[in-house]
Amino acid sequence: MAEPVDREFFTAGLRLHYVEWGDPDRHTVVLVHGNRDQCRSWDFFAAALFARQPFSYHVAALDLRGHGDSDWSPPGQAYQHADFLRDVAELLRHLKKDSATFIGHSLGASIALLFAGCFPEKVKRLVLIEALGPYARSDEDVPKLLARWLEDDGTTMEERMVYPALEEAAGAIEKRFPSIPPAARGHMARYGTKAAEQGFIWKHDPRMRFPSYSTFSEAQIQAFIRRIECPTLLVYGSESGFIKSPRAPRVSLFKNGRVVAIAGSGHHVPHEKPDELVKVVYPFLMD
Protein backbone atom coordinates (compact mmCIF):
# COMPACT_ATOMS: atom_id res chain seq x y z
CA MET A 1 0.00 0.00 0.00
CA ALA A 2 1.21 3.50 -0.82
CA GLU A 3 2.25 5.82 1.99
CA PRO A 4 -0.59 8.07 3.20
CA VAL A 5 -0.73 11.67 2.03
CA ASP A 6 -0.34 14.40 4.65
CA ARG A 7 -3.13 16.99 4.71
CA GLU A 8 -4.23 19.84 6.96
CA PHE A 9 -7.15 22.15 7.63
CA PHE A 10 -7.96 24.88 10.13
CA THR A 11 -10.61 25.17 12.82
CA ALA A 12 -10.99 27.71 15.64
CA GLY A 13 -7.56 29.12 14.79
CA LEU A 14 -5.84 25.73 15.06
CA ARG A 15 -4.09 23.86 12.28
CA LEU A 16 -5.17 20.22 12.32
CA HIS A 17 -3.30 17.44 10.56
CA TYR A 18 -4.59 14.24 9.02
CA VAL A 19 -3.42 11.60 6.57
CA GLU A 20 -5.44 9.95 3.87
CA TRP A 21 -5.37 6.89 1.66
CA GLY A 22 -7.43 6.15 -1.44
CA ASP A 23 -9.72 8.18 -3.67
CA PRO A 24 -11.30 11.17 -1.83
CA ASP A 25 -14.34 10.91 -4.10
CA ARG A 26 -15.22 7.54 -2.55
CA HIS A 27 -17.11 7.00 0.69
CA THR A 28 -14.88 8.07 3.59
CA VAL A 29 -13.88 6.01 6.62
CA VAL A 30 -12.64 8.31 9.41
CA LEU A 31 -10.16 6.84 11.91
CA VAL A 32 -9.97 8.53 15.32
CA HIS A 33 -7.13 7.65 17.69
CA GLY A 34 -7.02 7.43 21.47
CA ASN A 35 -5.59 9.72 24.14
CA ARG A 36 -1.91 10.65 23.62
CA ASP A 37 -1.81 8.64 20.41
CA GLN A 38 -1.65 9.93 16.82
CA CYS A 39 -2.93 9.21 13.35
CA ARG A 40 -0.02 7.10 12.09
CA SER A 41 -0.72 4.46 14.72
CA TRP A 42 -3.47 3.32 12.33
CA ASP A 43 -0.96 2.47 9.58
CA PHE A 44 -0.87 -1.28 10.22
CA PHE A 45 -4.65 -1.49 10.39
CA ALA A 46 -5.04 0.58 7.22
CA ALA A 47 -2.51 -1.58 5.37
CA ALA A 48 -4.39 -4.75 6.34
CA LEU A 49 -7.68 -3.14 5.31
CA PHE A 50 -6.45 -2.10 1.86
CA ALA A 51 -4.92 -5.55 1.36
CA ARG A 52 -8.47 -6.92 1.31
CA GLN A 53 -10.19 -7.01 -2.06
CA PRO A 54 -12.38 -5.36 -3.04
CA PHE A 55 -11.77 -2.34 -0.84
CA SER A 56 -12.08 1.03 -2.55
CA TYR A 57 -13.01 3.39 0.29
CA HIS A 58 -11.30 6.67 1.07
CA VAL A 59 -9.67 6.53 4.53
CA ALA A 60 -8.76 9.61 6.59
CA ALA A 61 -6.94 9.36 9.93
CA LEU A 62 -7.11 12.53 12.03
CA ASP A 63 -4.69 13.94 14.57
CA LEU A 64 -6.98 15.42 17.22
CA ARG A 65 -5.91 18.80 18.59
CA GLY A 66 -3.07 18.41 21.07
CA HIS A 67 -1.88 15.23 19.36
CA GLY A 68 0.52 14.21 16.62
CA ASP A 69 1.18 16.99 14.13
CA SER A 70 -1.91 19.04 15.00
CA ASP A 71 -1.72 22.28 16.97
CA TRP A 72 -2.20 22.38 20.73
CA SER A 73 -5.01 24.29 22.39
CA PRO A 74 -3.91 27.70 23.71
CA PRO A 75 -3.08 28.24 27.40
CA GLY A 76 -6.14 28.48 29.61
CA GLN A 77 -8.24 26.29 27.35
CA ALA A 78 -8.69 22.69 28.47
CA TYR A 79 -9.29 19.72 26.21
CA GLN A 80 -12.91 18.61 26.37
CA HIS A 81 -14.99 16.20 24.35
CA ALA A 82 -16.75 19.15 22.70
CA ASP A 83 -13.39 20.38 21.35
CA PHE A 84 -12.59 17.03 19.76
CA LEU A 85 -16.13 16.82 18.36
CA ARG A 86 -15.50 20.15 16.62
CA ASP A 87 -12.33 18.66 15.10
CA VAL A 88 -14.32 15.76 13.63
CA ALA A 89 -17.14 17.99 12.39
CA GLU A 90 -14.69 20.36 10.70
CA LEU A 91 -12.86 17.43 9.08
CA LEU A 92 -16.09 16.33 7.39
CA ARG A 93 -16.76 19.89 6.24
CA HIS A 94 -13.21 20.15 4.94
CA LEU A 95 -13.62 16.87 3.04
CA LYS A 96 -17.01 18.08 1.71
CA LYS A 97 -18.67 14.94 3.02
CA ASP A 98 -22.29 14.78 4.14
CA SER A 99 -21.65 11.46 5.90
CA ALA A 100 -18.90 8.99 6.70
CA THR A 101 -18.14 5.74 8.47
CA PHE A 102 -16.29 6.15 11.78
CA ILE A 103 -13.80 3.82 13.45
CA GLY A 104 -12.50 4.99 16.82
CA HIS A 105 -10.25 3.58 19.51
CA SER A 106 -10.57 4.46 23.22
CA LEU A 107 -10.96 8.27 23.44
CA GLY A 108 -11.47 8.31 19.67
CA ALA A 109 -14.29 5.80 19.98
CA SER A 110 -15.99 7.96 22.61
CA ILE A 111 -15.73 10.94 20.27
CA ALA A 112 -17.16 8.89 17.39
CA LEU A 113 -20.04 7.72 19.59
CA LEU A 114 -20.89 11.27 20.70
CA PHE A 115 -20.69 12.51 17.11
CA ALA A 116 -23.06 9.76 15.94
CA GLY A 117 -25.43 10.76 18.74
CA CYS A 118 -25.29 14.41 17.67
CA PHE A 119 -25.67 13.67 13.96
CA PRO A 120 -27.23 10.23 13.36
CA GLU A 121 -27.70 11.02 9.68
CA LYS A 122 -23.99 11.72 9.17
CA VAL A 123 -22.70 8.34 10.36
CA LYS A 124 -23.31 5.37 8.06
CA ARG A 125 -21.49 2.76 10.13
CA LEU A 126 -19.72 2.92 13.47
CA VAL A 127 -16.90 0.82 14.91
CA LEU A 128 -16.14 1.44 18.59
CA ILE A 129 -12.95 -0.17 19.87
CA GLU A 130 -12.54 -0.44 23.65
CA ALA A 131 -14.99 2.37 24.46
CA LEU A 132 -18.71 2.86 24.95
CA GLY A 133 -18.66 6.60 25.53
CA PRO A 134 -16.93 8.82 28.10
CA TYR A 135 -16.76 8.10 31.79
CA ALA A 136 -19.90 9.43 33.45
CA ARG A 137 -19.59 12.13 36.10
CA SER A 138 -21.87 12.23 39.08
CA ASP A 139 -23.34 15.50 40.33
CA GLU A 140 -20.90 15.36 43.24
CA ASP A 141 -17.93 14.99 40.85
CA VAL A 142 -18.58 18.19 38.92
CA PRO A 143 -17.64 20.86 41.53
CA LYS A 144 -14.43 18.99 42.40
CA LEU A 145 -13.42 18.58 38.75
CA LEU A 146 -14.04 22.25 38.00
CA ALA A 147 -12.22 23.38 41.13
CA ARG A 148 -9.20 21.26 40.22
CA TRP A 149 -9.10 22.77 36.73
CA LEU A 150 -9.39 26.32 38.10
CA GLU A 151 -6.45 25.66 40.42
CA ASP A 152 -4.30 24.10 37.70
CA ASP A 153 -5.47 23.72 34.09
CA GLY A 154 -2.34 21.76 33.21
CA THR A 155 -0.60 24.50 31.23
CA THR A 156 2.39 24.43 33.57
CA MET A 157 2.93 20.72 33.12
CA GLU A 158 6.16 19.83 31.37
CA GLU A 159 7.03 16.72 29.42
CA ARG A 160 10.10 15.82 31.41
CA MET A 161 11.02 12.61 29.64
CA VAL A 162 13.57 13.04 26.86
CA TYR A 163 14.74 9.94 25.02
CA PRO A 164 18.26 9.98 23.54
CA ALA A 165 17.14 7.59 20.79
CA LEU A 166 13.89 6.41 19.25
CA GLU A 167 14.62 2.92 20.52
CA GLU A 168 14.33 4.20 24.07
CA ALA A 169 10.98 5.84 23.30
CA ALA A 170 9.81 2.52 21.90
CA GLY A 171 11.09 0.86 25.07
CA ALA A 172 8.96 3.23 27.15
CA ILE A 173 5.91 2.08 25.19
CA GLU A 174 6.90 -1.54 25.85
CA LYS A 175 7.07 -0.91 29.59
CA ARG A 176 3.54 0.50 29.68
CA PHE A 177 2.01 -1.69 26.98
CA PRO A 178 4.01 -4.92 26.62
CA SER A 179 1.37 -6.48 24.36
CA ILE A 180 2.08 -4.04 21.52
CA PRO A 181 4.43 -5.81 19.06
CA PRO A 182 7.97 -4.45 18.49
CA ALA A 183 7.27 -3.22 14.94
CA ALA A 184 4.23 -1.26 16.10
CA ARG A 185 6.12 0.17 19.09
CA GLY A 186 8.90 1.39 16.83
CA HIS A 187 6.40 2.90 14.42
CA MET A 188 4.56 4.68 17.24
CA ALA A 189 7.84 6.06 18.58
CA ARG A 190 8.89 7.28 15.13
CA TYR A 191 5.68 9.16 14.42
CA GLY A 192 4.68 9.99 17.99
CA THR A 193 7.87 11.89 18.92
CA LYS A 194 9.66 14.99 17.70
CA ALA A 195 13.31 16.04 17.90
CA ALA A 196 14.42 18.06 20.93
CA GLU A 197 17.78 19.41 22.08
CA GLN A 198 18.86 16.23 23.82
CA GLY A 199 16.88 13.65 21.90
CA PHE A 200 13.19 13.00 21.34
CA ILE A 201 10.03 14.02 23.21
CA TRP A 202 6.40 13.02 22.70
CA LYS A 203 4.41 15.19 20.30
CA HIS A 204 1.23 15.24 22.36
CA ASP A 205 0.43 18.17 24.63
CA PRO A 206 1.48 17.26 28.19
CA ARG A 207 -1.89 18.63 29.32
CA MET A 208 -3.46 15.50 27.85
CA ARG A 209 -2.26 13.78 31.01
CA PHE A 210 -4.47 16.13 33.01
CA PRO A 211 -8.03 14.94 33.68
CA SER A 212 -10.66 16.59 31.48
CA TYR A 213 -13.44 18.43 33.23
CA SER A 214 -16.03 17.23 30.68
CA THR A 215 -19.06 16.49 32.82
CA PHE A 216 -21.49 14.20 31.00
CA SER A 217 -23.80 12.32 33.32
CA GLU A 218 -24.69 8.68 32.73
CA ALA A 219 -28.19 9.70 31.64
CA GLN A 220 -26.77 12.15 29.10
CA ILE A 221 -24.38 9.58 27.62
CA GLN A 222 -27.19 7.08 27.31
CA ALA A 223 -29.24 9.73 25.50
CA PHE A 224 -26.47 10.01 22.90
CA ILE A 225 -26.45 6.25 22.42
CA ARG A 226 -30.21 6.03 21.99
CA ARG A 227 -29.99 8.53 19.11
CA ILE A 228 -27.55 6.35 17.13
CA GLU A 229 -29.30 4.71 14.20
CA CYS A 230 -26.49 3.14 12.18
CA PRO A 231 -25.11 -0.41 12.40
CA THR A 232 -22.52 -0.44 15.18
CA LEU A 233 -19.67 -2.87 15.79
CA LEU A 234 -18.47 -2.92 19.40
CA VAL A 235 -14.97 -4.38 19.66
CA TYR A 236 -12.92 -5.16 22.74
CA GLY A 237 -9.73 -7.07 23.54
CA SER A 238 -10.32 -10.34 25.36
CA GLU A 239 -7.43 -9.57 27.75
CA SER A 240 -8.29 -5.95 28.49
CA GLY A 241 -10.98 -6.45 31.09
CA PHE A 242 -13.08 -3.83 29.33
CA ILE A 243 -16.21 -5.95 29.10
CA LYS A 244 -16.29 -5.99 32.92
CA SER A 245 -16.03 -2.20 33.19
CA PRO A 246 -18.84 -0.01 34.60
CA ARG A 247 -19.56 1.18 31.05
CA ALA A 248 -20.20 -2.32 29.66
CA PRO A 249 -23.99 -2.33 30.40
CA ARG A 250 -24.36 0.42 27.78
CA VAL A 251 -24.02 -2.31 25.14
CA SER A 252 -27.72 -3.12 25.51
CA LEU A 253 -28.69 0.44 24.52
CA PHE A 254 -27.51 0.19 20.90
CA LYS A 255 -30.38 -0.36 18.48
CA ASN A 256 -28.25 -2.13 15.90
CA GLY A 257 -25.12 -3.22 17.73
CA ARG A 258 -22.95 -6.32 17.63
CA VAL A 259 -20.21 -7.18 20.13
CA VAL A 260 -16.98 -8.90 19.06
CA ALA A 261 -13.95 -9.86 21.15
CA ILE A 262 -10.46 -9.95 19.62
CA ALA A 263 -8.75 -12.96 21.18
CA GLY A 264 -5.42 -12.35 22.87
CA SER A 265 -5.60 -8.56 22.63
CA GLY A 266 -5.41 -5.99 25.37
CA HIS A 267 -6.69 -2.42 25.22
CA HIS A 268 -4.70 -1.36 22.14
CA VAL A 269 -6.45 -3.61 19.64
CA PRO A 270 -5.49 -1.67 16.44
CA HIS A 271 -1.84 -1.71 17.52
CA GLU A 272 -1.70 -5.25 18.90
CA LYS A 273 -3.91 -7.20 16.49
CA PRO A 274 -4.49 -5.15 13.31
CA ASP A 275 -4.96 -8.19 11.06
CA GLU A 276 -7.43 -9.84 13.42
CA LEU A 277 -9.28 -6.53 13.77
CA VAL A 278 -9.60 -6.22 10.00
CA LYS A 279 -11.04 -9.73 9.84
CA VAL A 280 -14.11 -8.53 11.75
CA VAL A 281 -14.20 -4.91 10.52
CA TYR A 282 -13.91 -5.61 6.78
CA PRO A 283 -17.07 -7.74 6.44
CA PHE A 284 -18.92 -5.24 8.65
CA LEU A 285 -17.96 -2.41 6.28
CA MET A 286 -18.80 -4.41 3.17
CA ASP A 287 -22.12 -5.83 4.42
Image: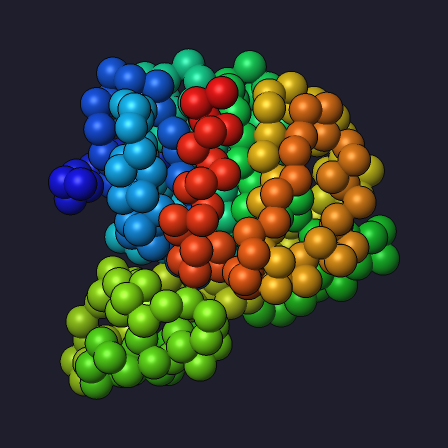
Name the residue located 23 percent from the left edge and 65 percent from the top edge. Answer: 190
Instruction: Give whichever of 164, 102 is nearer the camera.
Output: 102
Instruction: Give whichever of 23, 227 is nearer the camera.
Output: 23
Q: Is residue 95 above or below residue 184?
A: above
In-image side of 176 versus 259 (left or right): left
Name the residue located 54 percent from the left edge and 30 percent from the top edge. Answer: 126
Name the residue located 76 percent from the left edge and 58 percent from the top edge. Answer: 244
Determine which quarter of the picture holds residue 189: bottom left
Name the residue located 58 percent from the left edge and 34 percent from the top edge. Answer: 233
Q: Can residue 220 be seen from the camera position used here?
A: no
In-image side of 217 versus 38 (left or right): right
**Percent of width and height locating residue 183:** 28, 66
Q: Is residue 254 above or below residue 207?
A: above
**Percent of width and height locating residue 26:** 29, 17
**Percent of width and height locating residue 136:** 75, 50
In-image side of 208 versus 46 (left or right): right
* Colour scheme: rainbow
Callout count: 0
**Percent of width and height locating residue 4:** 19, 41
Q: Can residue 222 be seen from the camera position used here?
A: yes
Quadrant where the N terminus sits is top left
Q: Residue furthest left?
A: 2
